[in-house]
Amino acid sequence: MIKLKTILEKHNINLEENFYKDIKVFIELLQKWGKVHNLSGSLDEDSIYENILDSLFPLTFIENFSSFADIGTGAGYPGLILAIARKDSLGYLIEPRIKRVAFLSFVKANLGLNNLTILQKRVEAVDDLKAELITSRAVTNTKLLIELTKNIKQDNSSYLFYKGSMLENEIEEAKLNDYKVVSRSDRNYLYIKG
């Protein structure tokens, strides 16, 4: 975990030792389950560390939040990683695929993440929660994500979307006004302040 801690601290992400204990368990479980259930394309340590950094990097520039909903969490990026790092926030992982929900639930139970709720649903079918921050990584385009998540949005909700190279087109298509784009290597983070 020394290597991961060095990587995160290099990017001004400073977390308590408990995070590293928990993330070690997550990595072990991901590597074990991932081989059997094809949860993530890359299960080597460096790729997992990069995905963890990718999940946490926005903590360096977004405003504080008391609750978040992650759409299409998959193998845990970014929602599960945020829940481990921010145990003071209520997290909702919305994932329709049963194998991934089983994995996320197993990690939640192993780590005792009482701040976390996992929903096996499509986001448009969720109607009993509101989140201060809505996150998503590699699910669909920005305009559609905003539309699909309107039922879980509060008046002051912010959005954090992890995006690639098509971001400029998506911003134009969604007709966004008040937003911030932060880039790190080939990743773009779109932060729409609520």
Image (cartoon, rainbow, N blue to C red):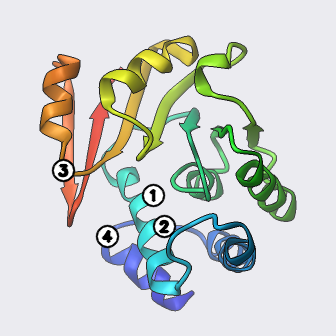
Residue most toward the bottom?
2
- Mark sitting on residue 55: 1
Is residue 107 depicted above or below 180 in this figure? below
- The mark found on residue 52 in the picture is 2
Residue in view at x 61 percent, y 59 percent: 75
Residue beneath label 4, please?
11
Proximity of marks 2 and 1: CB atoms separated by less than 8 Å: yes
**What is the three-letter code of the residue carrying label 1?**
Ser
The answer to whether residue 40 is above or below residue 1 is above
Which amino acid type is marked by label 4?
His
The alpha-carbon separation of the residues under discs 1 and 4 comes to 12 Å
Q: Residues within 10 Å of mark 1 (few under 14, many from 20)?
A: some
Residue shown at 38% from the left, 80% from the top: 7
Q: Work out whether residue 184 or residue 89 is closer to the camera in this orientation and state it.
A: 184
Can you give x and y, in whole percent of width and height, for residue 175 in the image?
17, 16
Frontmost of labels 4 and 2 is 2
Neighbours of disc 2 within 10 Å: few (<14), some (14-19), many (20+): many
Which of pointers 3 and 4 lies earlier in the amino acid sequence?
4
- Residue type at mark 3? Ser
Above or below — where is 20 with respect to 139? below
- Nearer to me, 1 or 17: 1
Foreground tag (3 vs 2): 3
Q: Quadrant of the N terminus?
A: bottom right
Give the image location of residue 168, x and y in percent: 12, 37
Give the percent coordinates (x, y) of residue 129.
68, 19
